[in-house]
Amino acid sequence: MAAGMLSSCSTQYLNVTGVAYQSIRAKNPVANRLDIPQDATIIVSCQVGANGEFNVLVQNNSDKIMTIDRTKSFFRNQSGNSVPYYDPTVRVQSQSTMVGGETGASVNLGSIASAAGIGGALGTALGGVNVGGSKSNATTNTNTTYIVDQPQISIAPHGQASMGRTFMIEGVGLAFLSQAVSSTPTDVSNVFTPTQTYAACNLCISYSVDDGKTFETILTDIYANSLLVSKVKQAGMVNDALRNIYLNKSDALTESWYALYFQSDAKQNNNKVQVSEILNFK
Amino acid sequence: MIMGRIKYILFGMVTMLAVSFTSCSSTQTFMVQGVPGTVISSPTNQRLGVLDNMGQAQIKTKRKDGYYHYLQAQVPGSNLQVPFALDYKNHSRAAQRGAFAFGKYTLLVGSIGCSIGSIACLIAGEKGPIVGVLLGGALGGALGGLALSAGNPKDIINRDYDYMKRQTTNSDILK
């Protein structure tokens, strides 16, 4: 009893060590859809998730059918690796189901005796006797689905479509911020340019509005334009660290995409990710 | 002799009651200060309160929700929700855990003893002592239950902090 009481008396203090912030934006930012001219042909909307997941939605702003050539549309990461949206890999999914059952299944002799009009003691005795011997006639149905990527996507006039693949932007997201707070002994307050940044990606989409006769490209450059880390100097005074970030980046909360991360041993309610679409048009 | 024992039992109950009431509230309350009319919301955009004409509001959070690293403040006329971090102070809740453990083991040992005693009395066919054993068991159960009401230790693990009584929005920096 005493041991149980002592073991349950250990103290677990809360420890918030720092706050980290990062924001990303397009090289040629478009504040919102109202800034896009009416006569734009194509609108590209990039969405970045909390862990750097990168998804693209393409909107056909023209009155013609738009064809996206996914074999000539690419995502390029900071490391320089360029990956086309079209994935020629054929994936196979199989699912087998067993149909049918058994024939010549067990027969209860009691029912035969009853049908034959055998009553009395013999009939009662036969009632408890089963004759086995069954044969399976089950068949297996296998459904095989071949998943083949589409090299082209057609978008109806004023319609929209997803590019269909999710890429990851290296150096963007909550895991990166957690690592940034852990590995940084002092405060960091860095603002970056498109050419001097720690995280960037480029998107190239090839599209046609003349039934595939000619293709044009639209390029979108996205980069991390800030990284701030503010350590908690006095135990428990977390807001001072947060205010330090606001003081060093007054437009922190008006960026299209930003993530605010609190490094702590309490894992819930410790981040805020503001996600707005990053737009481009042509 | 019996009166003396009752005195100790009563003392124990009052102490346990005091510990329970002072340390096991399921909510935390603190004051947020800022611009009058500012709406305070949780990270999941749940509205927690509005700052009054004096620019302050009492905000209540549930302990079971865990530590809120930040809340959000939206100044009247603005669409921007400005996060502000919640300052805290650590302090030990070992006494509460101890009370819980005491109650848990008292209940356990008391119940087992009561059961064994009752069975023994029933086998022996005695009626007098069984009344005493049952009363003792009931008292042990009540004490244990009182301590158990202090909360589950798994819940209490994240309770070694308290929010500072006064918190400030950051609306003065970001408007």
Image (cartoon, grey):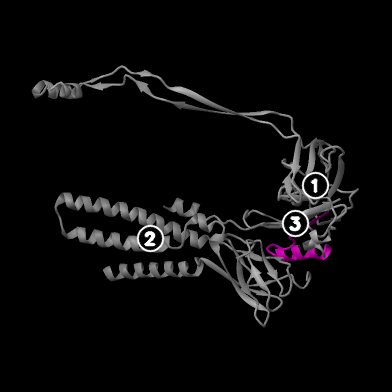
In the rendered view, does B96 fall on the left or right side of A30? left
In the rendered view, does B3 fall on the left or right side of A174? left
Same chain, marks 1 and 2? Answer: no
Give how far apart the Cα atoms at labels 1 and 2 are: 77 Å
Amino acid type of the residue that numbered disc 3 sits on in the rendered structure: Ser
Q: Nearer the viewer, residue A141 or B163?
A: A141
Q: Chain of mark 2?
A: B
- How far across and down, in percent of the image, does residue A124 sit? 13, 24
Q: Chain of mark 1?
A: A
Please tell me whether mark 1 sits on a helix, a strand or a loop.
loop
Instruction: Identify the magenta region.
Output: A225-249
Q: Residue at x 66, y 57 (%)?
A: A270
Q: Residue at x 87, y 48 (%)?
A: A197
Indicate which disc residue B144 carries.
Answer: 2
Amino acid type of the residue that numbered disc 1 sits on in the rendered structure: Lys
Q: Crowdedness of circle 1 by 10 Å Cα count: few (<14), some, many (20+)? A: some
Give how far apart the Cα atoms at labels 1 and 3 are: 28 Å
Q: Which residue is mark 1?
A: A64
Q: Nearer the viewer, residue A132 or A162?
A: A162
Residue A230 magenta-highlighted: yes
Q: Which residue is mark 3?
A: A276
Residue A53, visible in the rendered structure: no
Indicate which label's residue lies in the foreground, 2 or 3: 3
Residue A21, visible in the rendered structure: yes
Q: Residue at x 71, y 48 (%)?
A: A51
Q: Are marks 2 and 3 in contact (CB under 8 Å)?
A: no
Please tell me whether mark 3 sits on a helix, a strand or a loop.
loop
